[in-house]
Image: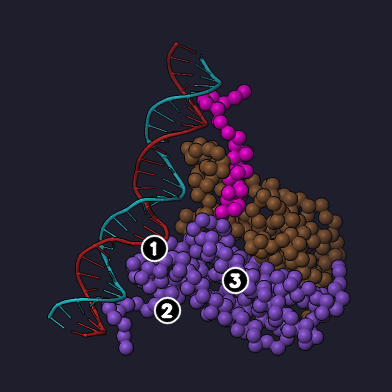
Chain colours: A brown, B purple, C cyan, D red
Amino acid sequence: MAERGRPRNFDKDAALARAMEVFWLRGYEGASMADLTSAMGIASPSLYAAFGSKEDLFRKALDYYVASEGGLIWGAVAETHTAYQAVETFLMRTARVFTRRSRPPGCLVVLSALHPNEHSETVRRELVQRRAQAVTELRERLRQGVERREISPAADLDAIAQYYITVQQGMSIQARDGATRKQLEQIAAAALAAWGPLTAPTARKH
Amino acid sequence: MAERGRPRNFDKDAALARAMEVFWLRGYEGASMADLTSAMGIASPSLYAAFGSKEDLFRKALDYYVASEGGLIWGAVAETHTAYQAVETFLMRTARVFTRRSRPPGCLVVLSALHPNEHSETVRRELVQRRAQAVTELRERLRQGVERREISPAADLDAIAQYYITVQQGMSIQARDGATRKQLEQIAAAALAAWGPLTAPTARKH
DNA sequence: CTAATTCTGTGTCGATCGTTACAGATATAT
DNA sequence: ATATATCTGTAACGATCGACACAGAATTAG
């Protein structure tokens, strides 16, 4: 049973996916309505009728991104059997996902709105929260590693989780600067070299 | 002997320092001429007469930033005696410089223009080059460490340098998200935990 | 003094920003 | 068929963008 009135002339999900790519490439402020409507193949009144406003559209594109692109990383992390494999998978998947051809390099959540601005402050705060949530999720995964005796109970899980998230955020910028997949994998491998010292019973100093 | 014509009514260097802070906080695109003239205490024709254009002003602010703020980090790095101390100083100074009160958090070079854009493409490319140069400088410092037998000749200096620069870039985002100095220091310490495995004669796997 | 030069402040340029008024088109409900 | 509802495209809104024309003010050169 269809809705009343003239039916929509475009695929809403497909248009949202296009919008996500524009925000991903250009950032929240950098993506103009002209960019968005052009990529989505619709006129601005259709966009406003379907998605509300630019900010509402970004929020929906963000959810779409977290579900699809984020799932490529965190879905694989969820299938690992040890805490080390979880972090290794997290970083190595990141290296792959950040360097796919015909996708913007780096992460939408990290890059979209880094500067405080009157017009994007609520969006920026949402992204800050999303980034903080990534630390929380990774720390929870590490906590399971402590339970399973893979990580020393003396390890500072907050610091370890924040460290690996920081590396991933740096990888977003490296990807934006044109780093190859191999280079990102080398960065990931270097970051993983800290795992032993960070999780061993007695933290060794240099 | 003074110049001909009406003398300038403001301190050019002080105005440049103000402009630098605005670009630092808001980014290149995010800093409007109204923001800049307001912070610099001058009208836009004075700005154009003294600095050329917004892009020229940014370029001068960038040089100013690299010399002053960048010097706080690299100056201290230059005074270290071992490669490890150099990297340690690099990251620990970063933690301090990125979290000073009444200064924008994070790094201007990293954050100012991450998204490709018609109006900021040349600026963006300049920043990409500056970031690449940081890798080169750090790698050169590591090369000295190899000469002095502090680092194994088998170590991958490109990967190590790019890794530590990546960590610093991630710290820019963490700082923007409100990370404390202590948190950044913990991230730096975690990154330094990889030093042993990365530079030892036989790279150990987990 | 006059002429030449350079800076300052007001005001405004065309372009673009996000957003929406409006009329016509296309569907369902009765 | 008529009424109602929703979407589409054109066209335009006020606000802001970076940049500058212009006239007056302030200095030096001769």
Q: Any magenta on residue B147?
A: no
Please report the residue visible at 62 percent of the width from the left and 23 percent of the height from the top. A1
Decide if residue B84 is in sight here. Answer: no
- Mark sitting earlier along the chain (1/2): 2
The magenta region covers A1-26
Please report the residue visible at 78 percent of the width from the left and 52 percent of the height from the top. A76
The amino acid on which the numbered mark 1 sits, given as a three-letter code, is: Ala
Q: Give the residue number, with chain letter if any, for mark 1.
A: B34
Chain letter of disc 2 in the image: B
The amino acid on which the numbered mark 3 sits, given as a three-letter code, is: Arg
Please report the residue visible at 87 percent of the width from the left and 76 percent of the height from the top. B202
Which mark is nearer the camera, 1 or 2? 2
Is A13 rendered above or below residue B200? above
Q: Give the residue number, with chain letter if any, for mark 3.
A: B130
Name the quarter where the C terminus of chain A is drawn.
Answer: bottom right
Please report the residue visible at 31 percent of the width from the left and 82 percent of the height from the top. B3
Say what secondary structure mark 3 lies in. Answer: helix
